[in-house]
Image (cartoon, rainbow, N blue to C red):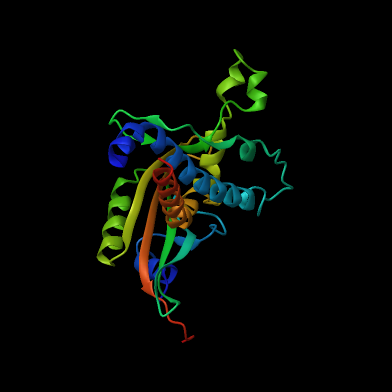
Amino acid sequence: MKVSRLADKTDEIVPRVLQAGGEVVEAKVKSNLQAVIGSGTKEESRSTGELVGALGVSPAMLDRGGNFNVKVGFDEPRRQQNTAVRKRSYKERTNAMIANVLEYGKHGQPAKPFLKPAKSASKNACIEAMKAKLESEVNGI
Amino acid sequence: MSLLEELNTVLAPLIPIETGVFSGTPPDRYLVITPMTDTFDLYTDDAPRHETQEARLSLFDKGSYTAIKNTIVRALLNADITITDRRYIGHEDDTGYHHFAIDVAKDYEYLMEEQ
């Protein structure tokens, strides 16, 4: 009986479980990002906090393979871009581009990886959070 | 032995290499190692016994990077270093360098007593 109820509610439970895991990863990405922004810059940092503010977890969506997934990433556009809609500068500086330069660096700018270390460091905690959430959801049926 | 030591030993004969940032005037082709994480994965007797060290290799090349990239990858694999990601980041129009990233990892025994 419980198993059949679980089967009926899978599409409700899975997004909540993924959300719980996504929040763990997001917290780690955020703390790593805050640590690397403005560190070791040649000039005084002019960080506005916009990149950190744009970080978030997407709602759980079905992909082409029929699997639910969530993404930890950056919202667009940046505030400055909102005022530049339909101007040439509109797509110049996206959060994704800034995050990419931080993560991988460039010639003359050392990489300050924050995403990959967050993935490695939060993997076990993420799995545990999802297991705990799944258990509580199953018990709540 | 650490991953950084191994990477320097394996790759220094192939390409100019530095850790963190390339000091001085960089050549047309060089490699920068960025240490990423050291994680404890396995425990016994309430103590970590095993750690995974990860690093990112950033290859910068003003010419064709394919041959040197393949040489680096083969050298890493021959040294039992795991490659977790390989990615062309792009051509930097302002500097003229192609940028290719290789993420690597290796497991090491973790000794509780300092050697």
Q: Is residue A4 above or below residue B54?
A: above
Q: Is residue A89 above or below residue A106?
A: above
Residue B110 lies left or right of residue A92; in this view the side is left
Residue B105 lies left or right of residue B95; in this view the side is left
Give the percent coordinates (x, y) of residue B34: 49, 58
Q: Is residue A106 visible?
A: no
Residue at point 50%, 48% (across, down): A25
Q: Quadrant of residue A16?
A: top left
Give B72 or B15, whichever is nearer the viewer. B72
Residue at point 49%, 61% (across, down): B35
Give A18 or B25, whichever is nearer the viewer. A18
Give the percent coordinates (x, y) of residue A23: 52, 44
The image quadrant where one finds the N terminus of chain B is bottom left
Q: Is residue A15 above or below residue A123?
A: above
Give A128 or A124, whichever is nearer the viewer. A128
Farthest residue to the top: give it.
A86
Q: Quadrant of residue B17?
A: bottom left
Q: Is residue B109 above or below residue A138?
A: below
Give the percent coordinates (x, y) of residue A102: 55, 45
Q: Is residue A58 visible?
A: yes
Give the percent coordinates (x, y) of residue A32: 58, 52
Residue A103 lies left or right of residue B12; in this view the side is right
Residue at point 59%, 12% (across, down): A86
Farthest residue to the front: give it.
A1
